[in-house]
Image (cartoon, grey):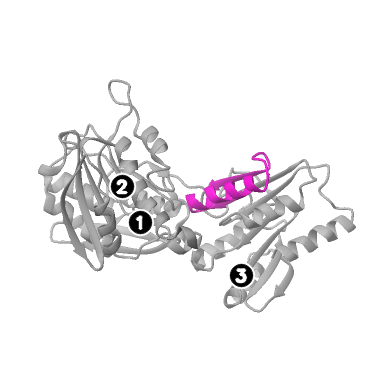
Amino acid sequence: MLKVFSQFLDEDTAAGKSPAGRSFSILDSGCGAGIIGICAAAALSDHPGLSIRCQDRDELARLVTLHNAAKNRIPLQVLAAFTEPLLAGPDGVHYDVILSNIPAKAGLPVLEDFVSRSAGLLNPGGRVIIVVVNTLAGFFRDNIKATGACLVREEKGTGHTVFVYGGTANSPQKGMAVNAGPGFLKRYPFYLRSETVYETEDTSLHLKTVYGAPGFDSPGGAVSAAVKLVHRLGPEQFPPAVCEGKAPLLVHEPGQGFFPCLLIDFLRWYCGFKNIQPPLLSGRNILALEAARHNIENNNFGVALTVPAEDLYFGREALLEAAGADTAGGRRRFGFLAAFPELLPQSAFPKSDRGLRETDQLAALWDSLLPLLVEGGLFIVAFGSSEAERFDRKKPAGFTRLGGIKREGFRALAYRYGN
């Protein structure tokens, strides 16, 4: 894809169509580590009007993109990165080039919308350049033609195909971006993957799952263990500030929203805590946050706030800000915190760091809790069983373990902070 992009830049220069002397905007949609946007910035470094918007559904991808841009001395006024869905951005903004190593597992309805919407987000003469796995080449070729976009070039490699297409006067969805926020699934129903009714002995919940978010169409072992542990602990283990609705709740990495919905249902209807508000939702994946928010709202539990956060350690300032101020004007802390952490694998680090860095992730999780929890706050965490054992061994002073439950290879643990 970068080779084809470079060829077009050379052809434009030879034809006197170089963007030098005017603004030139690029969208790197699904940026990952930022390689595409950074290469584009390097190729067009002589153009003072260059602006590149990198976007990814993963907050960690955004941070890594900014880190890599800084290492390559690309200023923030040239390259900005955002945690957002594909083709998000300010309404009415158009691009000269949209680049995407498009995720094959994004869901066919999402990919179909991408083709249609991207063509409508181009400036006159603009191009979309995407690379796709060969098994999806026919799907993209057909959709490019079906939307009325102009297929400019197609180049097939051993495993991937590059498509270059442009918009036309009849391009649909002109200027319509896909932005996160309340009502996300109602505005963009093509993200809907499935609908299910989840029933237990005590409750029945209507839940929707979305493409691009972790988790399946059922709670899974980690969530099931955490829910059972909440029920085992019972209402008496929740601090008074939670019962009275005075201390906020936080669920980190809520997946598709099974746990926060089951938690609210338990606290309101089983425990009788009528003042309980929806928990603040945080996590890396913006689509998971939107799915969880939708399911909370759709089950008449209220509207939850969401905060993209790489993890609880680096996201703690944003989480405390979102929690708001207490009656004395200080920062509110959380009376209940549930976390389903996504540990980076050891293979993500240099060989010499293996073992040490994973342990650091567990220690950082413990460190993140001190500024987040109120005195007497309740903390529940669910890992794979081996990670849970290592995490429990690193428990610092000030935390009391209240219990644990194993289920399907996962383990949920509960702790009290302070007295």
* Image mark count: 3
Q: Nearer the viewer, residue 381 or 390?
A: 390
Mark 1 — residue? 255
Q: Is residue 370 left or right of residue 116?
A: left
Mark 3 — residue? 132
Q: Which of disc 3 and disc 1 is earlier in sequence? A: 3
Residue 404's disc number? none
- Gap in angstroms between the C-alphas marked 3 and 2: 35 Å
C-beta proximity under 8 Å, tags 2 and 1: no
Q: Which residues are magenta?
A: 54-82
Image coordinates for residue 310, horizontal then vertical, percent: 44, 48
Mark 2 — residue? 251
Q: Residue at x 74, y 65 (%)?
A: 3
Q: Residue at x 85, y 53 (%)?
A: 17
Amino acid type at mark 1: Gly
Q: Is residue 84 left or right of residue 268?
A: right
Amino acid type at mark 3: Val
Q: Residue at x 12, y 54 (%)?
A: 232
Question: Within 10 angstroms of label 2, few (less than 14), some, or many (20 or more) residues?
Answer: many
Amino acid type at mark 2: Val
Q: Does residue 85 lie above or below 75 as drawn?
A: below
Q: Is residue 68 magenta?
A: yes
Q: Nearer the viewer, residue 131 or 387?
A: 387
Question: Within 10 angstroms of label 1, few (less than 14), some, or many (20 or more) residues?
Answer: many
Q: Nearer the viewer, residue 171 or 54?
A: 54
